[in-house]
Image (cartoon, rainbow, N blue to C red):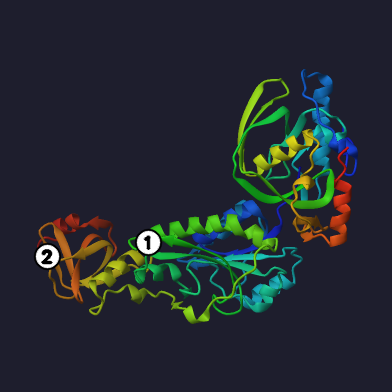
Amino acid sequence: MASQNKQPLIFFGAGEISLAALKTASKLFAIEAVFTKPDTEHRGKTSQTPVKQWADTQDIPTFQPANAKELENMLYSSNFSSAMGFLVDYGVIISQRSIDFFDKGIVNSHFSLLPRLRGADPITAAILQGLDTTGVTLMQLAAGLDTGPIIAQRELHGISKFTIHELDDALMKLNDAMINDFLISYYNGEITPQNQDESQATMTHRLQKSDGEITLDKSASQVEREVRAYLSWPGSFFEWKGRRVIIKQAQISQEHAEPLELKRVGNTIVLGCHNGSIEILRLQLAGKKEMTAIDFINGHSQELQ
Amino acid sequence: MKRKIVTIPDKVLRMKSKRIGYVDDSIRKLAEDMAQTASAWDRESEIGAAIAAIQVGEPIKLTAVRNNFEDYRDKSFVSFINPEIVKASPEKVTDIEGCLSVPGIYGRVARHKKIKVKAYDLDMKEVRLTLEGFPARLFQHEIDHMNGIIFLDHVASPKDLLEIDDAGRLHPLSADQAAELGQQASNHG
């Protein structure tokens, strides 16, 4: 029996979620080149994206353009033979000319049920909005922000209590399954993408450090969601006696407390919110290790009421 | 030693292969030749994944199967004698396959999703395999050869036939090409 060799493919990506997709795609396609973000310098140390590190171990040529224009120039001055690109969590908006370089365009994995939750942070947004269902969409990259025609989409249910780590993980696995089920079929021209319904579109915005601050106006249920959503970054935090406290795990409490008042109730700690309170189960004082509520109580019994 | 591959419309492909009762040096040599022939066939964008003895003109139940389907730089093969399907899932999966004896042409074929195979190795020791996915497809394809069947017989309609170009891309056949292929393939001895 004869079978087709793997077809060439060019991959665009950077972080861990990207890397998982690249590994799955590399079982189906011969990765001709990888485009990723430039190395960064931080306190004298150079750090490379997870995608770059892995590509180097596989002897796959890597390219690190500084911006969309440089990327375009690299493609057009190359002798790449790939008919298709695959982009996951790359963080650079690709130009239409770059997309046009590929006969079959560029496929993108977006971690939401498009047209809902377009934009920079769909995964965090799903938790912040208290959704029970989100999913992964394989999309044909187009010039706008996550507006391209949909190749395939799958739902993920039961996420309402997930932390960001659990959701990242579950969506990564779902994306892997979709890559295995659809990427080759799309390449072979067996799928006709469907346009998105613009009237259903919602946007998410890029997270900032200040989003993590627990302010007076945030309700208990919002804070509970933020704790889970911001677990990786920027963290859900408040100021207590001049120190920053980052909440690592919390649940809704029935105790009464004033907004931003931190009090001890028996062996538990409670933080008041706009219209209710949360019980803090695990926390971290800035600069120290993560600890349980009991550890915190024992260490600060004089400062807590 | 590389052997010549029999291609359609040669009627040899329609012969039924006989069970092997005893493995002597000539069988071992044939198995080696078959492996060499299949790996020499490798092209830019295609690999010879397996070959049946009938494809080099020998009507006996012997097949050489590639060890590594992912890395085509690994050109090692393993041989199976008298393979038979002892169990097959009712569930079928459709995917694209090709054949060394039908050069340049691929087709969508429905195969049993999971199968259990009983066979013998070159030392005539029994081998039991539980297969799904690509290896399951491959064994069904090779066992078909031993019954005088080629994959084109399973292709449901002309729109499921594809040809491969020099760059390794698949394109649907024109109506004329499909008709000609139908003629060539339909010889039943």
Q: Amino acid at mark 2?
A: Leu
Q: Amino acid at mark 1?
A: Ile
Q: Is residue B58 left or right of residue A44?
A: right
Visible residue check, residue B45: no
Total marks shown come to: 2
- Residue identifier under label 1: A159
Q: Is residue A100 left or right of residue A194?
A: right
Q: Residue at x 25, y 62 (%)?
A: A250
| Spatial CA span between label 2 and label 1 | 35 Å
Q: Is residue B32 left or right of residue A243?
A: right
Q: Is residue A69 left or right of residue A248?
A: right
Choose top left, top right, bottom left or bottom right for residue B133: top right
Count residues near mark 2 (Cα–Cα under 10 Å), then give few for <14, some for 14-19, many for 20+.
some
Same subunit, tags 2 and 1: yes
- Residue identifier under label 2: A304
x, y (%) of residue A156? 44, 61
Visible residue check, residue A144: yes
Above or below — where is A96 with respect to B119?
Answer: below
Badge 2: chain ID:
A
Badge 1: chain ID:
A
Above or below — where is A197 with respect to B87?
Answer: below
Q: Residue at x 62, y 32 (%)?
A: B129
x, y (%) of residue B24? 80, 18
